[in-house]
Amino acid sequence: MMAGAATPVAIDSAVEWQLILGQAPSGEKSEAVKLLELVAAGQYCEVLRSEAAASFFGTSLSEDSNEDVKALVADHDAQAYIETRLRAERSTNATYERQLEILAIGVASLYVFMQSGWTGPLLDIEGADLLPQGCRAATAELRTKAMQSLVEDGEEVYALTTRPLFLVFALAIFGSDALFTDVKSARWWRARSLLMQQKILDNPADTLRTAIYETMDAQAADLPPLDSWRELHARFNLEKGLVFHWYQENTKPQESFKAAQEASNFQWTLSGALGRRTKFQEFDVSHLVVFAESAAQVGGSAVADGDDADAVAPTPKALALNDDTMLETVAFKQTGSDAVPVQKNLSVIDQCILLAYCLNVKNMNPQDGLTTEEMVPYVRRVLENANNWMVHTMALLLRTRLEGHKSRTVERSCLQLQALVDQFPLEESTPAERMLHVFSIELPPKWEMERELGERFVSLGATRSALDIFERLEMWEDAISCYQMMEQPKKAEAIIEARLKVTPRSPKLHCLLGDIRADPAYYELAWSLSEGRYARAMRSLGAHYFKLGEWVKAIECYHRALAINSLFENSWFVMGCAAMRAEDWDQAVRAFSRVTSLDHENGEAWNNLASVYVRQKKKREAWRALREAIKQHYDNSKIWENYMFISTDLGEFQEAMHSMERVLESRWDKAGEKSQVVDVGVLEILVDAVTTPDMKDASGHPAANHAPRLTQLLNSITAKVATNPGVFACAARLAAARGAFRKALDYRLKAYRCMLHHPRMADDEAIFKYTVQRALELVQAYIDLGPKFEAPRMAEADDEEATEGGAVAEQATVVCKDWAYQARMTLKTLIGRTKNNFEDTPLHDSLKQRLEEVTALAQA
């Protein structure tokens, strides 16, 4: 029997949740509880060197006496070996205490991995030290196999990942659901381990994303009661929201952060307060400020997680601004009724929640200066009190990012980021404190912070310094970019060739060489070397074929790449564009639909999806897609125009009129687009709809109900557009149908005058023909409407219904007393102006004939 399972001990299940909270476990000091105490104290190496761990890992087993050890020595597959050990534990029906011991070993393994790459300080333990003696000399082989086992969806692991074997241990242990039959928190640790695996990959992996989501959803059902474990629930929801944030699901984190806030009973608000930002400012101006207050108790733990707010704790090095103009921070007004009160210390979990909300500001807003200014007060509120080393580090990191684009703060931004990188090996803070809230913040690994520092150097023009960082970190893509900026492409090529001599079968390096030489053969070689698993090779090959216009080949390449890892939004988008060019509409729909599922706010994808639906004659689907596109590109007149056309076709007349109004507003002030502000064809359809009896809209209601709204729209259009006869003709038809006869006649006159004063009217046959049409319409309007009676109306009543049927009302007068004279003069004027060029033509003769008819009608 395995060590630790001989004498069952009654253990309170609360120890599991105390472990997550970083608290020393309560209850009887069994062997399992002692291991959990060591984990909570940050003594992870002691846990992994314990008797229980040696029993689990089979540290003392020899190759000769154990087949599993023999297999491990032969293939160096630590994952398979640990899974075998776990099956042996399951076969003994491990007690709850033994399950807790293995849980402690898994947590210690995960924490050692994170301490090595995320939090520091440095450790003196290696994963091979825990395994049987026979394989300890094969450290390099064990590492290589571990790195291979961590690859997911074709996404490679960062080459210099520290101690990956410990992450393999953790993933194998927490992946054994059959072992942890009594442990309720194992899924939480599994989700954390999977997230760490994701963070060391080159790109997001769909398999890991799905596994993390499913694991956290399953864990949610096993959480203890909220009332007794408020901080635990706060942490769970906070971590869930941060996972959504990492995968850029921008609309999902808000709900989780809100749940975390409610669980913690945390109250905060973003407001404005008077203060000064510069040393020479003589008056106060309004600045954003976060007013926040923690609850007195958070699930049984005191404010600041049990830390004495007055105790002196080590803090990360926060650099001063030292600017001759800017103050260190905003000096808020301290006296008077509008003074900013001194705020109390916040609990650490509430500081984490506040930093999460800060990240969410960026999720929900565009990348601009206003967004940056809105994020600053969250960070400032957290920096007021340093309660935890890593949380304070995260706040400083966010401050460096916010200050990196301002001339007066960019220097501190770079120096502060360097200081955060340099603090990693320091032992000023204990491992336990650093690990206490590491999952509640979006802290990158050490190498990513160094990479960020390199990118900051690039932005400042210090490309050589950045290159030194990227080469040391073996981030070859960034190094190549630096060489290209330095106009030294040959050196970039040389460095990749040198690396290929070390690792000649690296698909990534062959792809990079293909990028430099613009040779697709390298992508094909990379695909071959990876045995069809390196998706990046197919993405690059697909892009190559897309540039060449070989749409079918591009689609095939992207299809292969996305079958391995489907989380590449841009790849789906490009494949959709290629499918549109190839007229493969079904494939285009699948591609753009996937883009919108990955990023619901991708307006271009929604617009393209609508275009494809139109080709498929699925107008209702196209209409819905355009509605989503408009939400993301509200000022794009082209999308509004497309939406107008589809709405008109579907009978969505209200939406069609709103769209036409938006097109008018967006294009009116643009000099080159004034001729396109109104689509007369759509206007004619709308007028036909509201003036045709029994016509229904998309909802089945009478289209005539939209007449008042259409009248308002036409009033707005005619107030701006004074040279389009088609617009006035539409307005005339609608006014006449609604009994506004004077207005209808006036619109007909304006339509005619637009053409009469056209500079080419007297010598261009097409323009003359159109002018004749408007003249005859005006003459007919004089005949039909002139003799009618209409009560005079105030200007503001123009949109009211006129007297039904034109019936004579009190004080009604004739619309146009001299209608016959006006009709004759209209025809005579046009005949005279066009006599020289168009006399004896059929059109000119038709005007003369109409003049005779009007004269006869007037005499009658």
Image: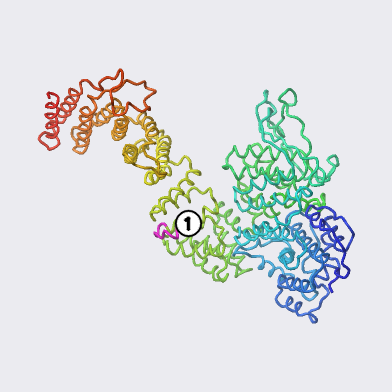
In this view, 397 is above or below 803: below
Figure check: 529 above or below 190? below
- Horizontal side of 831 relative to 330 (left or right) equals left
* Residue 647, image x, y percentages: 40, 44
State left or right for residue 760 relative to residue 96: left
Indicate the position of residue 838 as horizontal and vertical percent values. Answer: 13, 34
Residue annotated with mark 1? 574
Q: Which residue is at the front of the view, 228 or 850?
A: 228
| Along the viewing direction, whichever of 132 and 293 lies nearer the viewer | 293
Side of 166 where 822 appears, left or right: left
Q: Main secondary structure of the magenta part?
A: helix
The question of residue 111 being in magenta is answered with no
Find the magenta span and give its range: 580-590
Q: Secondary structure at mark 1?
A: helix
**Residue in view at x 58 percent, y 64 percent:** 509
Please, what is the three-letter code of the amino acid marked with disc 1? Val
Outermost bottom residue:
64
Q: Residue at x 87, y 60 (%)?
A: 34
In the picture, which quadrant includes the C terminus?
A: top left
Q: Quadrant of residue 279?
A: top right
Neighbor class of circle 1 (other Cα within 10 Å; few <14, some 14-19, many 20+) is many
Query: Can the viewer see residue 416?
Result: no
Q: Quadrant of residue 784?
A: top left
Task: Name the colour scheme.
Answer: rainbow
Residue 825 in view (yes/no): yes
- x and y percent of residue 632 in the render? 51, 44
Residue 714 horizontal/vertical position (percent) = 36, 32
Is residue 582 highlighted in magenta?
yes
Residue in view at x 65 percent, y 41 percent? 402
Q: Left or right of 432: which side holds 836?
A: left
571 versus 680 height, above or below: below
